[in-house]
Structures are given as C-alpha cells and as structure tokens.
Amino acid sequence: MAKRTITTKATKPLYAGVGVTDLAVEIVRDYVTVAQKRVSDLDFEPKAFRTQATTVVNARVEAISKDAKTIPAKLQTFVDENISTVGDAYGDLVNRGESLVTRIRKQESTKSTVASARTTSAKAKTTKTQATKATKSTAKKASTTARKKSSAPKSSAKATTTAASKTAASATQAAADAAQKVGD
C-alpha cells in the first residue's frame, strides 16, 4: 500500500505536465476554430477584406492579451498546489532510503565486512613495512647473507591474502543480505 501511495504521489507532476499540455492544445484549437469561422465570414473584395481582417485581428489580439494576462496567475496557482505534493513524495523517498541504509548498516554481515576490511588493511600495511625493511636490509648486506631470503614479508603477505579473501567473502554475504532488504 505504501508503494502505491508513493507511486501515485510521484506521478502527479507527470500528469500535471500532461494536463498543462492538453489545456494549451485545447486553447489553440479554440482559437483556430474561431479564426476559421471568421475567415469564412469575410468578404473577399480587397478593400472589404482588409477592413474585415484588421477588425478580426484586433479583436483576437485583444482577447488573447486578456487570456495571456491570466495564464501566469493560473499557472502559479497550479504550481503552488502541486509543489507540496512533490515535496511530500520527495520526503517519503528520502525517509525510505535513509531507513534502508540504516538497516543495511546495522546488519551483522555488514559489520563483519567492515571489521574484516580493517584487519585486511592493517595486515597490508604490515606486509608493506616488512617488505620495505627486508629490501633495505638485503641491499645493505652485499655478502653471502644477501642470498638468504627473508621469511617475514612472505608470511605477512600470505596473511594479508588470507584476510583479503575473508573480507571478500564477507562483503559478498553483506551484499546479498542488503539486496534482500531492498524493497521491504
């Protein structure tokens, strides 16, 4: 039922735009009908035609001017009446989105993913530090010890890889859980 209410409120501006267009077409058609009627009543003698045409044009210009002066007020009233509807629909959508994001942030799989990502980040920093130290140490030793391999960066890199894999799995589960919440 909430979906129907939001959909109805969201479509009102669209319908309003269609209604304004329909009204404009109706007005133009009325003017064309009146103009056609007046043209059929005209005498086609050059002097008479000029006089009649001037009279008809002046009358239509005056009528259009009067109508044109009222259109901005009518349009403003229409906009004012519908602006609250649009604002309400927007507010409803904002509240719905905020509620969904809050629910996703509170779910256990999301919290687990955040914690796992922090662990992975820390392990990656450790691996980088150890690799940098091992490289500097190896570069300083130009003797036979330079041929030895340091195991610290290798084990740290493996731990980082494992943590990253766990983070990816946790993120996949969090995304699946979040997807189930969308549309609730």
Image: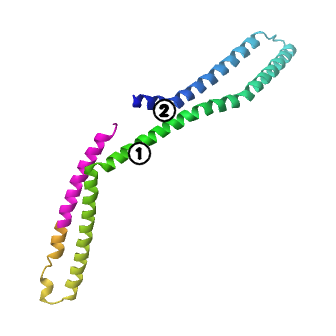
Instruction: Say what secondary structure mark 2 lies in.
Output: helix
Distance from Cα at disc 2 to Cα at disc 1? 18 Å
- Callout 2–callout 1 Cβ contact below 8 Å: no
Residue at image coords 36%, 43%: 100
Q: Is residue 110 above or below residue 117?
A: above
Instruction: Say what secondary structure mark 1 lies in.
Output: helix
What amino acid is labelled 2 in the image? Ala
Picture quarter with the C terminus: top left
Residue at image coords 48%, 32%: 10
Q: Which mark is residue 132?
A: none
The answer to which of marks 2 and 1 sits earlier in the sequence is 2
Q: Position of residue 172 (x, y in %)?
A: 24, 50
Out of 91 and 71, give the one closest to the viewer: 91
Q: Is residue 70 above or below residue 181?
A: above
Instruction: Name the colouring of the figure.
Output: rainbow
Instruction: Please state the extent of the stretch shown in magenta in the rendering.
Output: 159-184
Q: Is residue 164 magenta?
A: yes
